């Protein structure tokens, strides 16, 4: 018997579909990170990309998909930040509906946050959600384990047990880890279990009951503001703690810290991932920390990359997101950071809510917007077609970068690779209407927007999990 301890790996689970055999004809194949950017065909067979190139011969009994002619085929998208609401809030979303929304947006995998009811703070709970995903989800679901028990910020969750159950990362998202000593201990555990720690940055004594960015528009609208320092303050502190833990790891490695050595086998500095960055100050702190070589990664959401606080003049509750959508200057800094890689990933922060939680005065409305179904189209329209971010960089930020952060293999267009891909018509114009959305909730910040570029098909593990005919809603 093999008695070596097996390193636990992140588990991503979804329903098993029978493998399909189909040939997608006359599309553009686009995976520049792996040297693919040309017209051609794709043959999917046995769960894998069986052939890729021009003029692929059709094997007997293989279905030929001709209605995707002229579309683009990309590696499947991966969302490092979604709220799928199972367990406890299934009236907002569940694993079936949330994963359907993901598939409709081109996603092949999503990482679900832990702020459910109960909070995912112990191994059996994480295992239960992942087992449910295996029964219900149409795209792969990874689960986050909380940092603190019940996300109360008082004592650590069962971090080791969560890792053994296959969580993809740790996060108290929805709330910050306010206690510096607790975060320090969490960083040490994350190091020991080889999982990233995802941080929601917020100083609750600054954000208080604010509803939007603190600036000229909050003053004009008479709405309570949340200063940018509510995010950049905790960010500066957390970066200091990462430096502290890194020095500690180096001492252990050098054999200079015998007291800690026994408890931290294979000590490395954990990856710290900064969630939904919103301000120029935060971008600047991250830029400097990366230059220094700190092991950090970051994300931004489509709403923060595309909108500014002036939009709140509509009092649209779906624009009430946490952190708030900030000024034009902040937005510009985020976009530049996404373009140059300072912001590594796009995270949707897909946060479904029921009408009774959103269709109330903005002060009382819950935080959050849905985002899985609109992310690619919104960013293609707002950043790629305007020349601010290249399509190659966008695909990297939405597919490869999240995988690198979590430490899982990235989807790729290559012969023999798992068929995890999506197809989009980059010319199709469409309007985001409640009827066009497939998730359970309709609280989308992009309702009413018209986009260019639409997902037509999503394939996971060699089977179609989503397909839409041209022009169909
Ligand atoms: Zn958050």
Image (spheres, grey):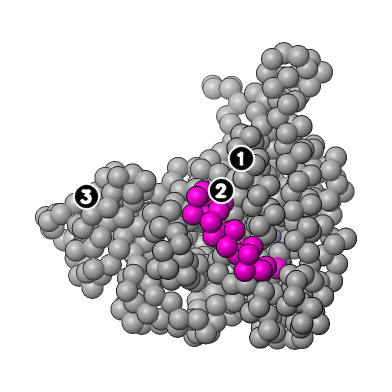
* Region rendered in magenta: 324-351
Among the 4 quarters of the image, the one containing residue 355:
bottom right
Residue drawn at the location 34% of the way across and 51% of the way down: 31
**Relative to residue 136, is residue 223 drawn left or right?**
right
**Relative to residue 399, is residue 168 drawn left or right?**
right
Badge 3 residue CB within 8 Å of ligand 1: no
In this figure, which residue is indicated by the disc labeled 1? Answer: 290
| CA–CA distance in space, label 2 to label 3 | 35 Å
The quarter in which the N terminus is drawn is top right
Depth order, front residue of 469/375: 375
User: Callout 3: helix, strand or loop?
Assistant: strand
Residue 256: which disc? none
Are there few (<14), some (14-19), or many (20+) residues within 10 Å of tag 3?
Answer: some
Are there few (<14), some (14-19), or many (20+) residues within 10 Å of tag 2?
Answer: many
Residue drawn at the location 70% of the way across and 30% of the way down: 246
Q: Which callout, 2 or 3, points at the residue further toward the start of the chain?
A: 3
| CA–CA distance in space, label 1 to label 2 | 8 Å
In this figure, which residue is indicated by the disc labeled 2? Answer: 342
| CA–CA distance in space, label 3 to label 1 | 39 Å
**Residue 472: image x %, image y %?**
36, 82
């Amino acid at each position: 018997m093999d008695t070596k301890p097996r390193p636990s790996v992140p588990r991503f689970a979804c329903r098993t579909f029978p493998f399909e055999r189909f040939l997608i004809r006359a599309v553009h194949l686009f995976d520049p990170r792996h040297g693919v950017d040309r017209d051609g065909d794709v043959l999917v067979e046995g769960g894998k990309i069986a052939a890729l190139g021009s003029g692929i011969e059709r094997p007997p009994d293989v279905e030929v998909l001709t209605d995707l002619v002229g579309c683009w085929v990309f590696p499947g998208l991966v969302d490092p930040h979604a709220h799928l609401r199972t367990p406890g809030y299934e009236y907002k979303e569940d694993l079936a509906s949330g994963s359907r929304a993901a598939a409709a947006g081109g996603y092949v995998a999503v990482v679900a946050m832990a702020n459910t009811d109960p909070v995912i703070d112990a191994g059996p709970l994480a295992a239960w959600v992942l087992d449910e995903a295996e029964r219900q989800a149409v795209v792969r679901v990874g689960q986050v384990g909380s940092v603190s028990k019940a996300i109360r910020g008082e004592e650590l969750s069962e971090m080791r047990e969560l890792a053994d159950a296959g969580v993809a990362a740790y996060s108290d998202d929805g709330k910050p880890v306010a206690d510096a000593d607790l975060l320090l201990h969490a960083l040490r555990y994350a190091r020991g279990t080889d999982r990233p720690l995802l941080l929601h940055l917020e100083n609750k004594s600054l954000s208080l009951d604010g509803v939007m960015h603190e600036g000229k528009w909050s003053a004009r609208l008479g709405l309570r503001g949340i200063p940018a320092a509510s995010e950049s303050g905790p960010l500066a502190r957390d970066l200091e703690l990462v430096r502290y833990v890194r020095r500690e790891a180096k001492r252990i490695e050098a054999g200079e810290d015998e007291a800690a050595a026994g408890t931290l086998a294979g000590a490395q500095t954990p990856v710290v991932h900064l969630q939904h960055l919103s301000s120029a100050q935060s971008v600047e702190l991250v830029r400097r920390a990366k230059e220094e070589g700190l092991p950090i990664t970051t994300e931004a959401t489509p709403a923060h990359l595309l909108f500014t606080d002036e939009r709140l003049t509509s009092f649209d509750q779906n624009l009430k997101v946490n952190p708030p959508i900030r000024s034009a200057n902040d937005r510009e800094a985020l976009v530049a950071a996404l373009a140059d890689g300072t912001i590594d990933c796009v995270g949707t922060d897909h946060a479904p809510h029921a009408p009774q939680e959103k269709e109330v005065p903005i002060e009382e409305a819950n935080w959050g917007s849905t985002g899985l179904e609109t992310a690619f189209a919104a960013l293609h329209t707002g950043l790629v077609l305007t020349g601010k971010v290249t399509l190659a960089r966008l695909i990297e930020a939405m597919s490869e970068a999240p995988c690198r952060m979590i430490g899982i293999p990235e989807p790729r267009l290559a012969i023999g690779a798992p068929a995890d891909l999506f197809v989009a018509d980059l010319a199709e114009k469409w309007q985001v209407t409640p009827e066009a959305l497939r998730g359970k909730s309709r609280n989308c910040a992009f309702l009413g927007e018209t986009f260019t570029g639409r997902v037509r098909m999503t394939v996971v593990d060699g089977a179609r999990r989503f397909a839409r005919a041209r022009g169909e809603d």
